[in-house]
Amino acid sequence: MGLNWKTIAGALVAASAIAVSGAASAKDFRLGLITPPPHIWTQAAEAFGAELAEKSGGEHSVTVFPARQLGNEAEMLQQLQTGALDMAFMTVAEVSNRAPDLGAFYAPFLANDIDHAGRILRTDGAKALLEQLPQTVGVVGLGYGMAGLRQIVSRGEVNSAEDLAGLKLRITPFEPILDFYNALGAAPTPMPLPSVYDALANGQVDAIDMDAELIWVLKYYEHADTVVQSNHMMFPMVGLVSARVWAGLSAQDRTLIAELMAKHVDSCIDSYVAKDRAWLEQIRGTGKTYVEVGPDFFGDAVAEWNAIWSEKSSALDDLRQIAADTAE
Ligand code: BEZ
């Protein structure tokens, strides 16, 4: 069940007609992400690039393109498929649009808290879900990172799930979250991260689904009346290499890149475990109405989501077992 770079490489080579020369050649890899430069993911990407340059003796380098400079995640995923882009740190959300099994990570309340989310992502069972990506999506997934658990920020008062009914509520563009808010009777509005601040500020949306880091650091709370701390979903990230680019790398380069990319995306898990609760406390301290809720708040929506996704993802039962095994 365990996944490592050799498993991925083996699957890819078997599926690919591209000849692998085995010869190392110097390369400046291009790595894209949608997060802004100070964001934890972007910092991890920069650290990955620096260590790859160092450990390859200067043979390889990485130019990081943050803040959607290369397009949104759907566009970057296409570029990875064609080989126009070498690497990305990307939401599992976007990848799950092409590989629905990964949608199981968004089972509401799968993780009990941020530490548990990290433990789930570090299991061999979770990593095994990446093995299908070369065939199904045309990318090689080398390891998971994450962002914080999901919360709700609203321009109006929210005291019950009924208050969310009909609200234009910004979501990350992916199906599991769309199904969740549809089940709640909200009007989920898919919107990429860089558009969110203005949309909330000018009332284009009534509420947003977001994590504590960005609510605090990007000051989304300034344009809200209520913050609902619900911790309703985890939010994994994955370090990706274009399968086409991967097929052209030497075995030595694959080993180095796999090891370092996995290390640096994993470092994001440590960062959120260390900081997520503190950001929530800072948000609570702003004096906005702050409501702490659990699964009961969402009524039947959780069960409805589970029914929908037991059909859409074959990984849901396995991930539930992993979550049970890693709970404390
Ligand atoms: C979001 O879509 O909410 C998001 C994307 C990347 C990192 C964190 C949040």
Image (spheres, rainbow, N blue to C red):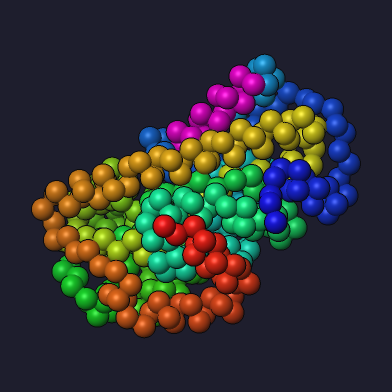
Asked whether 312 or 124 is in front, the reply is 124
Q: Residue at position x 30%, y 76% from top?
A: 296
* 20 relative to 194 in the view: left or right: right
In the rendered image, is residue 234 in sight?
Answer: no
Where residue 88 sits, quadrant-wise, is: top right
Asked whether 187 or 142 is in front, the reply is 142
Which quadrant does the N terminus fall into? bottom right
Name the spot of residue 81 as percent of width and height, x first.
69, 51
Where residue 252 sits, quadrant-wise, is: top right
Q: Residue at position x 16%, y 69% from top?
A: 157
Q: Magenta residues? A: 41-55
| Number of numbered callouts drawn | 0
Name the spot of residue 256 as percent of width and height, x first.
69, 30
Q: Residue at position x 60%, y 37% from top?
A: 261
Name the spot of residue 57 as percent of width and height, x first.
67, 16
* 291 relative to 241 in the view: left or right: left
- When the figure is inspected, residue 315 is found, relative to residue 302, above or below; the finding is above
Which quadrant does the C terminus fall into? bottom left
Asked whether 307 or 20 is in front, the reply is 307
Identify the residue at the far top of this view: 57
Q: Residue at position x 46%, y 77% from top?
A: 305
- When the figure is inspected, residue 188 is found, relative to residue 193, above or below; the finding is below
In the rendered image, is residue 294 in sight?
Answer: yes
**Residue 43 is inside the magenta segment:** yes
